[in-house]
Amino acid sequence: MKLSLSLQQALLAHLLAYPPLTTALGGPNIHDAPPHPSSGTRPDTYLVIGDESISAFSTQTTNGSEHEIVLSVWSAIRGYAALKSAMAALYDALEETPLILDGGTVVSLRFLAARTSREARGRLRRADCRFRLLVEHDAES
């Protein structure tokens, strides 16, 4: 639990630094809550760092935690092409380069599942992408 915020900050920095993802999102459109529609600044496609489940994952020699995180891609663009392009870039961003975390080391990052859906009124498409991260805590943290 203690590295949950550090992990979120690392994910945000890592994803914002991956040009193919920001291109697919039409800019640095990565948030920890969906932009409010009334703000007038909601982009057509954006990513939200969402729900997280955390459980202990320790050995006799190290302390750690298992984090299952949902990263949701939203798109107001008709069809699923923009959404799926952003999903692919998200997958690549997390597969290609290691995630730098303050207070621990991500020793495993694995894609678990994804599900696409359409909002009830059909205006937004959504993809919930679940990832599992095993984090080994630094000895001093």
Image (cartoon, grey):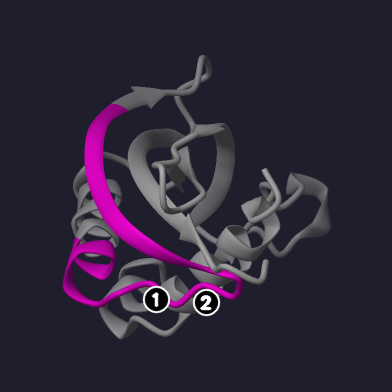
Name which residue lies at 54% across and 71% down.
10
* Residue beneath disc 1: 22
Mark 2 or mark 1: name the one nearer the start of the chain: 1
- The answer to the question of whether label 2 and label 1 lie on touching residues, with beta carbons closer than 8 A, is yes
Count of numbered circles on the image: 2
| Furthest residue in direction right, as rendered | 38
- Residue 97, position as x, y percentages in the image: 24, 77
CA separation in Å, label 2 and label 1: 5 Å
* Residue beneath disc 2: 28
- Residue 73, position as x, y percentages in the image: 42, 47
Magenta part of the protein: which range?
92-115
Which of 21 and 117 lies nearest the eye of the viewer?
21
Which of 113 and 108 lies nearest the eye of the viewer?
108
Name which residue lies at 71% across and 65% down.
41
Name which residue lies at 55% across and 64% down.
30
Name which residue lies at 62% across and 68% down.
9
Where residue 115 sits, quadrant-wise, is top left
For mark 1, give the secondary structure: helix
For mark 2, give the secondary structure: loop
